Image (cartoon, grey):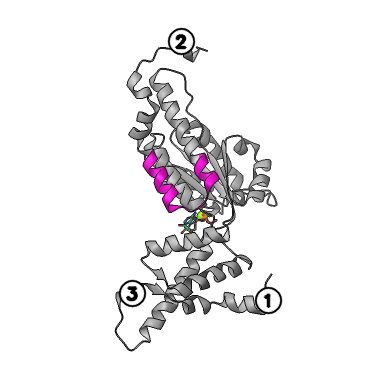
Amino acid sequence: MTTTAETPAVDAPTLDPQQAWNDSHVGEVLDQLDRELIGLAPVKERIRNIAALLLVDGMRRRTGLTTAGPSLHMCFTGNPGTGKTTVAMRMAEILHRLGYLRKGHLVAVTRDDLVGQYIGHTAPRTREVLKRAMGGVLFIDEAYYLHRPENERDYGQEAIEILLQDMENRRNDLVVILAGYADRMDQFFRSNPGLSSRVAHHIEFPDYSAAQLNAIARLLLERMQYRLSGDAGVALAEYIELRRRQPHFANARSIRNALDRARLRQASRLCSRHQPLTREDLMTLEAGDFRASRVFAAGTSRSVA
Ligand SMILES: Nc1ncnc2c1ncn2[C@@H]1O[C@H](COP(=O)(O)OP(=O)(O)OP(=O)(O)O)[C@@H](O)[C@H]1O
Ligand SMILES: [Mg+2]
């Protein structure tokens, strides 16, 4: 091993970390990530660290220092609607900007895209998906379904073996992100130590607080050019409090769905009016557009926990 302190800087100007950071334009993507995604502080922090690692790796390469190219396969765990798919797309873009991925696209799949029903069907399917994902990110949602311990002759194992080969041999051209619930993913990794040892980054996506869900709602509305009347703001906050405690709550996804339904009610309300509409009318969601939701009925009858 050479000691870094004695190695002369071959390419001095590019060793300025600020310059390298600016040149990659990754700061802009990270700032955008900060603006467009509410909360997720630990996730954002980890992405910054990975970006720094890759920049330093690039500078090491330019000065002739050894670099194996860091392994960037990842595991995203969290409940539904916590932003895993969205962050995976951003990750692909960041890794592309940092020169780690050639293309920076995302191919999102589940078990059925990789595993066939009959003998001989799995390998071509998995290889085809891998081919499409090369140069980008392969995102495998609910990855644990690849492993079916109850079924002795399950073809999922075949898909895992093929994945493992490319995760190792083509790791400079492919990043695999496995996503799903934390407990099931733990179990999956325990049964597949080969896979577990190739996943360097485990990132947890926490559930959003009520305040964060509120902020997400406002961000989504702003993007769609809608606004809330004063009363609608209050109704939405109450809606979020109630909905969070009900079954099948899916974080930001539930909020997005609630807004879609509120827009439907607004549209019906506006169409039943017999007077001309203003731009303001078209943009504004009223309290009633939220309060008509079943969530309020369930809340008052105390039928849910
Ligand atoms: N932190 C956030 N800020 C703003 N919008 C968000 C945030 N997290 C998620 N969203 C929005 O919520 C929706 C659901 O997010 P996403 O699909 O990324 O979640 P997921 O964790 O992949 O969910 P699932 O497990 O159900 O696939 C998306 O429309 C996304 O834009
Ligand atoms: Mg998803």
Residue at 66 percent of width and 45 percent of height: 186
- Image point (68%, 76%), residue name: 302
Residue under numbered circle 3 = 280
Q: Is residue 291 magenta?
A: no
For the residues labelled 2 and 3, the Cα–Cα distance comes to 67 Å
Which of 80 and 229 lies nearest the eye of the viewer? 229
Q: As rendered, which of 257 and 232 lies closer to the eye?
A: 232
* Amino acid type at image mark 1: Arg
Q: Secondary structure at mark 1?
A: loop
Using the numbered discs, state the Cα–Cα distance from disc 3 to disc 1 in whole angstroms.
36 Å
| Residue 291 in the image: above or below residue 44 | below
Percent position of residue 196, x then y: 62, 38
First in sequence: mark 2 or mark 1?
2
Lower position in the chain sequence, tag 2 or tag 3: 2
| Mark 2 surroundings within 10 Å by alpha-carbon count, few (fewer than 14), some (14 through 19), many (20 or more) | few
Element marked by disc 2: helix
Label 2 belongs to which residue? 6
Cβ atoms under marks 2 and 3 closer than 8 Å = no
Mark with earlier residue (3, 1)? 3
Left or right of residue 145, residue 133 in this image: left
Q: Position of residue 192 (x, y in %)?
A: 65, 40
Q: Residue at x 58, y 76 (%)?
A: 296
Task: Check disc 1: other Cα within 10 Å, few if <14, some if 14-19, many if 20+.
Answer: few
Query: Which disc, if any, is residue 33?
Result: none
Q: Amino acid at mark 2?
A: Glu
Q: Which mark is nearer the camera, 2 or 3?
A: 3
Residue 81, above or below 261: above
Rendered image: mark on residue 302: 1
**From the viewer's perspective, is residue 132 above or below residue 213?**
above
